[in-house]
Image (tube, grey):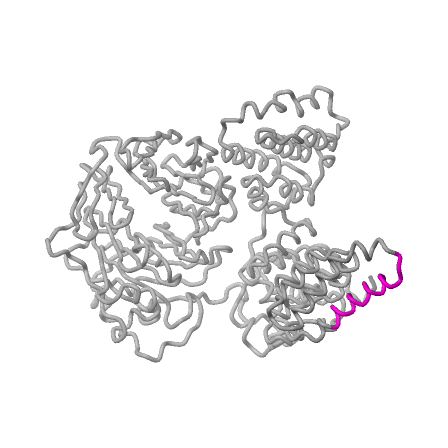
Amino acid sequence: MSDSTMIIDETNRKNLIFLILQFLHEEGYLKSLHLLEQDSGVFFDYSYFSCFITNGNWRDAEDYLSAFTSPDANTFSRKMFVDLYKWKFSEAAHSGGSESVNTFSKDLRRIPVFKDDGFEDLVNVIAVEDIRIPEKTGSVDKALVRASLCVELRKLAERNPSLCGKLVFPNLNKSALLSLISLICPNSSGRMGGSKEDLIILILQFLHEAKYKNTLHRLEQESEVFFNINYLAEVMKLGEMGKAEEYLAAFTDKHANKYSKAMFLELQKLSTSWEAITTSESLDNTSQKTKLQASVAMLAKKNPALKDKLSFPEMKKSRLLKLMKQTMDWWRPHSCNNSQSLEHIPVVQYLCGEPSSLENKFNRTGPRTKVGNCKLNEINHPSECSTLVLPDYWSDIRIACLTYSPSGDYILALADDATHKLWTWSTAQNDFCKHAPRILKEDVFPKPRLHQPMSGETMKNEIAASVEDSTSCFVIKGSYLFSTSGAKIAVFDLKSFERVAAFGSPNKPRATHFIFIPGDLLAVGLDDGSILIHCLSSRKIKEKLDGHDQRITCLAFSRCFNVLVSSAADGKLCVWSSKSWVKLTSIDSIQNFCNRLNNKASLVTQIQFDPYQIELLVVRDKWISRHAAPTLDCLRQWVPDESEAAITCATYSSDGEIIYVGFRSESIKILDSETFVIKCRINLTAFTQPIPSNIRVVVYPAVVAAHPSHPSQISVGLSNGKVIVLQPLGRGGWGETAALEDDGDISDGSEHCY
C-alpha cells in the first residue's frame, strides 16, 4: 500500500470493524453481521454460537467455531471440537443414524495429538464412556444436555488463547458509526437521499478492499443499496444458478416488471441447460452460454427495479478508514483520557444537525462543549411531558405491584395494605391503545376512572401477620387475578371483584413470587427458597425445586428456551428446565456482577426477559445487567452515578428498545436497552410535591409498568400511593425532539400536584 492510501494502524482497523458490526446489528443485517464476525475474527458472539447448540445445529456451530480456531490450535480448542463431535454423534446415534459412527470417526481423525499429550490423555478424550453416551442419554432431556454443553463450552472459550479478547463487545453508544460519519459530512444527502445509504456504500468499499467477500455480497443483498452485476456474472460462469437466483431475488421478484421476469427466465434456462452446455465442446453451446449471460446483464441495465443500484460511486481508497482516523485524531485531544477506545465517544445532537465541518472544529482553540459532558435531556416539570394522575380517593399507602392489562385497556395496582385498585377508560378499549400518544389531552380522550363494580366488592388480600413477612405479588390470567400479600394466594374475578378461591398456607413457608408457565402450570416461589410447580387442572403439586437457601425474590420464564429463572435473597440465580425440572446452571450474582470497590451485598429485586425472551434483565438496588439465556452469560452491566440513590425498579418497554429505571432519588432514567446509554431523565419532584410545599416529602417510584403496545408510555406507582401515567410530548420518543399535536394543548401542571 502506498503512502497516498494512508496506512491505518491495526487498532483503528479493529475499532472500525466493531463499529460496522454494531451498525449491522442495529439495521437488522444479521447474516452480514455474523459473516463479518467470522471473516474478521475480531468478535466471537457466544450467544449466537450457543443458539446453534441449543437448537442442535451442530454443523453450523462447528463452522462458526472453525472461523476463529481449529482443533490443532491448542488444547482448549481441541476440547471444544471434541465436545461438539461427541454430542453430534450422541444425538445422531440415538436417532438411528446409520452413518453416525463413520462420521464420528472422520471427525476424530481431525483431532491432533499434541506433543504434551500422552496416550492416556488421548484415550480420555475418546473414551469408551463417550462412545456409549447414546445408551445413557436415551432418556435424558436434549434441552438439558445442550444447555449444560453451552455452559461447559463457555468455560473453555474463556480460557482459550484463540478467543482471548474476542468474547466481549465494546460498550458503544447507539448509532456510533453513523454519528461519526455525520460529524465529517453533516450535510450528506447522498445519491439516495440519506447518510445511512452513504455509509453502507462506504462499508461495501471497505469490505471489498479487505477481501471479506462473503460479508460483502451478503450485505449487498440485505441492504439492497448496490446490485453487483459483476458478482452475478461470476456465479453464473461457475454454474451456481441457485446462488444467482437468490442474489437477484434480494433486489426484485419475477412479478415486479417484464425485465425482472425475463431475468429469472434466462437464469432458469441456464440452469436447465448448464450440464449439456458444460459437457459439450461445441462452439454453438459455448456461444449460447455467453449469449444468455450477456442477455441477463443487458436486462439488468434496463430494469427499473435496478436502475439506481448498478453504479458504484468513485471514491479514493480506504475512504471509511480515513474518515474514522480523521475523526479519532480530532477526538482524542478533547477526550478526558486521550484514549483510543471508542467506548466514550458520545452520540450528541449537533453531530447530525449543524452545517459545520470537521475542518472548522480543527481550527478552534478548544472543544465546543466538552463533548463527553453534553447536557442530558431532562424533564423537570409536568408540562415537559404528557402526564396523567390516576384518580384515587382513600389511600396513601405505597404501591407494591403495578401492571397494564395484556391489551392495555386498564391499569391494575396493589398497595402495601393488600388493597387492589383498577382504573378503566369509558370509551372503546381499543381506542386507548390506538390513540396512546394523545390520551392525556382532556379534549381528545376522557379521564380514567377508578373502577368499582355495582356490588360494592373490593379486592383485598389476606395480609401477613408481620411486616417482615409481607411480600406482594400478582399476575393476570384471562379475567382472573391471582394475588398475594404475604398470606394465601387469592383468586379474584376481575369483572365482579369477587374472591372465588384461595390456596396455599397462611403460615410458613409463604408465597413470595409466582408466575404462570405454559402448560397450565403456576410456579410459586416461597420464603424458604423452594419453588413449587402447581398444575392448575389437576390441583396438584407437580414438582418441588430446591436450589436456593433464602426466600425467592422473583421468577421469569422464557418460551424461547423453555427455562425458568429464579432469583433469591441468597444472591443466586438458577436456571431450570421446564421439561425435566432439572437445574441447568446457577451463578452467584454477587460475585459475578460486582465491579465496584465497595462490593457489598446487593439484593436481586427483579428479573425479566426481554420481549423476544432471549435476554434476561437483572435488577439490583445498585446496578442492572443483561444476560444471555440459558447460560446467564453477562452481556452488559450498568452502574448509576455514585450520587444516585438506590434503584427501586426497572422494566423493558414493549418493544425491548429501552429500559425504564426508577430510583429512590425521586427520578426515572430511560436507557437504551442495548448500550445502556441514558436517553432521558425524569425528575419526579415537581410531579409529587404539594403546592404550596411547606414540607419536603420524599416520594419515589416504587414500581414502573410499561404499556404493552406503546413503547413510550409508562405508568408509575409511587411510594405515596399515587399512580401517574407518563409519555413524551407529540409523537417523539424519550430523548427526542418532537412537535406537539395541533388538536389541543396539554393542561398546565397545577392538577398534577398532590
Does the rendering let one see residue 9?
A: no
Q: Is residue 291 magenta?
A: yes
Question: Magenta part of the protein: which range?
Answer: 281-298
- Determine whether, in the image, residue 440 is placed left or right of residue 77: left
Residue found 22% across the figure and 59% down from its top: 423
Q: Quadrant of residue 127?
A: top right
Looking at the picture, tell me which residue is in the foreground, 255 or 707: 255
Q: Position of residue 78 (x, y in %)?
A: 69, 33
Principal secondary structure, stretch drawn in magenta: helix
Above-or-below relation of 106 to 475: above
Above-or-below relation of 134 to 395: above
Does the rendering let one see residue 155?
A: yes
Q: Quadrant of the C terminus?
A: bottom left
- Determine whether, in the image, residue 343 is placed left or right of residue 754: right
- Determine whether, in the image, residue 439 is placed left or right of residue 495: right
Q: Quadrant of the N terminus?
A: bottom right
Looking at the picture, tell me which residue is in the foreground, 452 or 415: 452
Residue found 74% across the figure and 65% down from its top: 318
Above-or-below relation of 618 to 379: above
